[in-house]
Image (cartoon, rainbow, N blue to C red):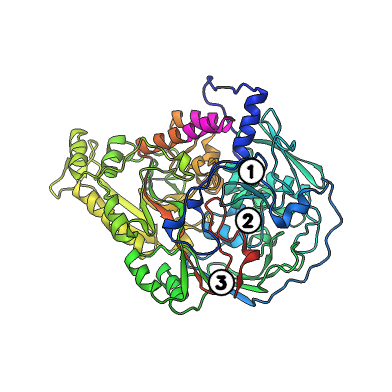
Amino acid sequence: MSQDRVVVGTDLRRPRFTRRKLLRVGLSFATLPLFAACSQPAAPASPADTKPAAPAATAAPAATTASAAAAQAPATQAAPAAKVEPKAAGGTLKMLLWQAPTILNPHLSQGTKDYYAARICAEPLMTVNNDGKFEPVLAAEVPSLQNGGVATDGKSVTYKLKPGVKWADGQPFSADDVVFTYEFVSTKESGAITAGSYQNVEKVEALDPGAVKISFKEPTGGWFVPFVGYTGQILPKHAMKDFIGARSREAPLNVKIFGTGPFLVDEFKPGDLVIYKANPYYREAGKPHFERIELKGGGDATTAARAVFQTGEFDYGWNLQVEAPVLQDIMNGGKGDLLNPPGSGVEQFFYNFADPNKEVDGERGAPSTKHPFLTDIKVRQALTLAVDRQTIAKQLYGDGMLGVVTPNILGTPKSLASKNTTAEFSIEKANAILDEAGYKRGADGVRVTPGGVRMKILFQTSTNSLRQKEQAIIKDGWQKIGIETEIKSVDQSVYFASDPGNPDIFPRFSADVEMFSSGVDSPFPVGYMNRFYTGSDPSRTWAQKSNNYSGKNFLKWKNDDFDKLFDQVLVELDQEKAAGMWQQLNDLIVHNYAAVPLIDRTSSSAKSKQLTGPAPRPFDNEVWNIADWKKG
């Protein structure tokens, strides 16, 4: 789903451009100071070993060794590279995702596990490394003011592409594929979930086969958001051109993706298994090191942990959201290493501002409905005060091992974390607020609204023993303040699926409150914060039946102050000012109780002791460098 940027109000601050300011801005947005604490070094390190990285000192980070030569190449596309036979000394890599992939097109994906499965094959123009610098992937070099890639007026960026890159079917990769990917994402009928990362783009042009120009509607400091990281994966035009728009979900690529990356899909059983084989046209000689990947889905996080740490049946286990004491015991099996750098995402729950119990034209929670009591900020405030986050952190997350209490929706990078929020717990205050607001208890102790509606909440999340214990702690607090609470768990393969016809997918929000983890996709977190944006066209921004629930704002929360500030941050060039604005946006969400942050989680994945290469980072998928993974 494409979403045009709409200016709300008339007092947007237009940046004034001076050569000195633009040079300073160029330095800042080519070298945003991220933190090594958000990433994992190649060799496993304990959390105490991770320290904030120093900001980069130059505007254009040097290309990695593998791409240094390509960075000096001319912009025109070179002759296609010869077929490279992969070095497959490692045999088969066995991976376990207990949340099974259901679709392999990254722009139609609702869950991280789908992005994960696609990223093994598909690639963006750039990624962000552990030192906070941008690294070229399909780009030949990192654009900057100094090399002419970033325009001095802040309204465009030009990428030179690596020459000789081929798709896994042998066809040449070119700027036309980048242009097509934008057309696919921006076409409303395609229903692209990633559209929020592209909403400030005006057009994408192929200057020649080896160069592409992205023009923005207004000057923007976040020029690096489109086509970067896991939401920036490029699609092959020749395979997808007939499936743009209304036919997007009919594309064969959705279930058998191939890209320019080190692997392509050989077999896919949605909700169960993905088998990959090495890409014979991959551009780096001697890579990948495996000839085959078996990515198994299903089961649960505890089983996944045992399969790496105890039995050694799998080489890699993703997202081990297991109670800390249980995980610590499993780790004593000694066959694996825990990868748990911070920055994975925030465990949080969301309030539904529509009425999930009322049906309009076959749709529950329709945009025209309003929740009978969650639209009252006093009720949301009381419910939030009744949540014991410290107990959740201590008992379930190991009080630092797997995550820490956070009062912020936005905490990565640390420069965006607000200091204006708290995580207060008080049953007494919560009861007082509801009493004062006129929500009286009935004979059974359950409150009713002034209009006579019994205050009962359906609270849903994915099936996971840790999450069900989180629900139990939260339910206990809510019932102590007179809110009847029913707990529901949905199988993760359904909850995070991309099937608009299933009422249990999280974007349909068929409950009063729902919970899951979500993380930033960029150091300029447009896509992440877009979840709370409405703008002038809720038919596109709100998840609903008419757009196949592809709108990012599934809460159906509208706040004019948030929308206005969100529009402003998109065109702010000064990164320090932008950081302050992102903090203000976080505060609007938290202080209006639209969503409630619980735990700032670590990545919590496991690898066998024989496997080298995995290095989770917060702004790309864990498999971003899977071409380098090997055993021995």
Q: Which residue is denoted by mark 3 in the rendering?
A: 611
- Segment colored magenta: 564-582
Q: Which mark is residue 226?
A: 1
Cα–Cα gap, marks 2 and 1 = 22 Å
Mark 1: give few (<14), some (14-19) or many (20+) Cα within 10 Å.
Answer: many
Residue 513 place in picture, x, y as percent: 36, 49
Which of discs 3 and 2 lies nearer the camera? The answer is 3
On the question of residue 121 being in view, the answer is yes
Circle 2 residue: 249
Crowdedness of circle 3 by 10 Å Cα count: few (<14), some, many (20+)? some
Q: How many marks overall?
A: 3
Q: Secondary structure at mark 1?
A: loop
Q: Nearer the viewer, mark 2 or mark 1?
A: 1
Horizontal arrangement in the rendering, residue 440 relative to residue 40 (left or right) = left
Q: Is residue 323 left or right of residue 617?
A: left
> Residue 460's x, y, as percent?
36, 55
Say what secondary structure mark 2 lies in.
helix
User: Any magenta on residue 567?
Assistant: yes
Whole-Å distance between the Cαs marked 1 and 3? 32 Å
Q: Name the N-terminal-most of marks 1 and 3.
A: 1
